[in-house]
């Protein structure tokens, strides 16, 4: 994984490509695990030595990844784990990936360091747009801090923009 500070990103939108759900194992907390087990059964989860995960399908992708002709969607949209809500953003209390000034984001009394995972196909590089800096990054920070749970800008719309060519996996 490689990360870039948020100030190097012009804009970001989930394009429903499914890459995140195909590339990464999702670590879940106990509350998220319990919710998934109650709704879908324990067989949709897995455990490691000290972590709980969403089970991966035979093709290696998340068990809840749903494929459609023009993209992918999450079968847990109504109860999506926090890790999924935050991806591709990595929000830390210390500048773990360097470039502290470019990653710094002040939210009230909190000084956060925000990076994006370069594996995301929805990233546009450049000077941050006003909307991205004012609303999108703020929403990710609020989710990370536990101030908000609902997603508005930080998730894909069910029906993506026309004319976008999705990758086939």
Image: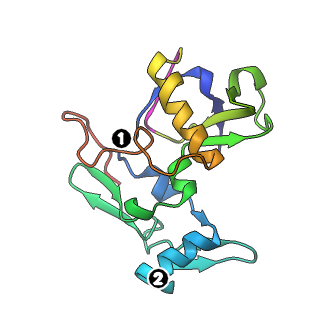
Q: Is residue 169 left or right of residue 9?
A: left
Asked whether 1 or 26 is in front, the reply is 26
Q: Is residue 67 above or below residue 153?
A: below
Residue 167: x and y in percent read: 33, 45
Residue 33 sits inside the magenta stretch: no
Residue at 45% of width from left, 21% of height from top?
131
Residue 3: x and y in percent read: 65, 36
Q: Is residue 7 above or below residue 157?
A: above
Image quarter for residue 113? top right
What is the secondary structure assignment of the residue under circle 1?
A: loop
Count neighbours of disc 2 (C-alpha within 10 A) and say few if under 14, some if 14 to 19, many if 20 or more: few
Residue 70 visible (yes or no): yes
Q: CA distance from mark 2 to mark 1?
A: 30 Å
Label 2: which residue?
38
Label 2 close to label 1 by CB (< 8 Å): no
Image quarter for residue 1? top right
Q: Tag 1 or tag 2, which sits nearer the N-term?
A: 1
């Amino acid at each position: 994984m490689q990360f870039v500070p948020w100030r190097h990103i012009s804009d970001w939108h989930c394009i429903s490509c499914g890459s995140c759900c195909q590339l990464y194992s999702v670590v879940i907390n106990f509350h998220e695990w319990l919710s998934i087990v109650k709704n879908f059964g324990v067989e949709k989860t897995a455990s490691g030595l000290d972590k709980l995960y969403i089970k991966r399908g035979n093709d290696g992708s998340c068990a809840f990844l749903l494929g459609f002709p023009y993209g992918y969607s999450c079968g847990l949209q109504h109860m999506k784990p926090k890790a999924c809500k935050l991806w591709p953003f990595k929000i830390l209390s210390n500048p773990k990936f360097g470039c502290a000034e470019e990653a710094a984001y002040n939210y009230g009394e909190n000084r956060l360091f925000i990076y994006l995972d370069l594996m995301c196909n929805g990233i546009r590089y450049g000077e941050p747009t006003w909307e991205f800096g004012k609303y999108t990054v703020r929403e990710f920070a609020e989710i990370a801090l536990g101030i908000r749970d609902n997603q508005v800008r930080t998730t894909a719309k069910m029906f993506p923009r026309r004319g976008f060519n999705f990758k086939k996996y």
